[in-house]
Amino acid sequence: MSFIQSIYDLFKKTPPTPPQKRPLLIFGRQLNDWDGFLFDNVLPWANETIPNTKLNISDLIFLWVISRFGQDFHSYPTYLSKNYGITKPLEQVQSLINLGLVDNDFTVTELGRKTIDKNREYIELHKSGWTTPEEKKYNKESNRLFMEKHAEWLLEIGLTDEGNKILTNLEVDTKRDECFEIFQKGETLGKSKNYLESNLILLPLLEDDSVDFYVSLYERIAKNYRGLKEYQNEIDICQKFLNDIQPLYGGDMWIEDFTKRINFATNHIK
């Protein structure tokens, strides 16, 4: 009998039922992957046939890896065996050779390249963890909803400190996410050469304690200044990063990147 159950028995109460997590949405399916077991094994859809082809999903991912690394087997990523069951590439490449997609020297043929391009959506899904942006949003909201209910459950059974800690962490995460959404808007504006508009919404983030994506933020602001040809401002923001933020990382991380920016901008000041 658990400690919590003993307390409720003492007061003749039935403890409330703890909340349950909703299944994750991954590759259009509902999967119970909250403990992370899914991506430690061969994916359930790895051997499914791609419509209108003679390839399964594992074949396509293998073909794509071959197009990148050729015979450099030591560079083959571990996910080939872990997630797609490609444990013997020398043997398993034969089916791709038979289909005319790969040569005997592990060179992807023109037909192989066309096959990769035609089925690029599967490659992109692989790169994004087999979840669409909509699924990622749903999964994140599901996790937040569960954590809120879990905190309420802890408070209800008298574990006040644990419940309040979760609620505090959720509040911190929410503020960080709000800041990151602003950053993403600024990043999009900057990439589309709306440098001034981008910096107008990004500069206030420098003073927000909820920000933890320092490198990306400072780099985008610096890039915007360069796009505006405001080289002294580029120098200043890079120097601010080196003075205030870089020591948080320790060692020499990012020093070379921001120093190069400073040197470039210095050489372009008239």
Image (tube, rainbow, N blue to C red):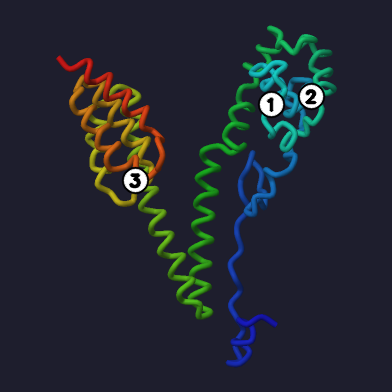
Q: Please tell me which residue is depicted at 74% across the width and 29% down the height of the picture.
A: 58
Tell me if mark 2 has few (under 14), some (14-19) or many (20+) residues whose alpha carbon lies within 10 angstroms of its own: some
The mark that comes first in sequence, 2 or 3, is: 2
Q: Nearer the viewer, mark 2 or mark 3?
A: 2
Between the C-alphas of marks 1 and 3, the distance is 37 Å
Mark 1 and 2 residues: CB-CB less than 8 Å, in contact? yes
The kind of secondary structure element at disc 3 is helix
The residue at 79%/24% (across/down) is 89
Q: Residues within 10 Å of mark 1 (few under 14, many from 20)?
A: some
Task: Please state the horizontal and vertical placement of residue 138, each as a whole percent of the image.
Answer: 53, 47
Name which residue type carries label 1. Tyr
Residue at numbered disc 3: 179
* Residue at the limit of the structure toward the left, as seen here: 270
Cα separation between marks 1 and 2: 10 Å
Residue 93: x and y in percent read: 80, 19
Which quarter of the image is occupied by the C terminus?
Answer: top left
Q: Amino acid at mark 3?
A: Cys
At mark 1, the secondary structure is: loop
Where is 201 relative to 259, above or below?
below
Q: Which residue is mark 1?
A: 76
Say the numbered circle drawn on residue 89: 2
Residue at 52 percent of width and 40 percent of height: 134
Going from N to C along the chain, the mark reached first, 1 or 2, is 1
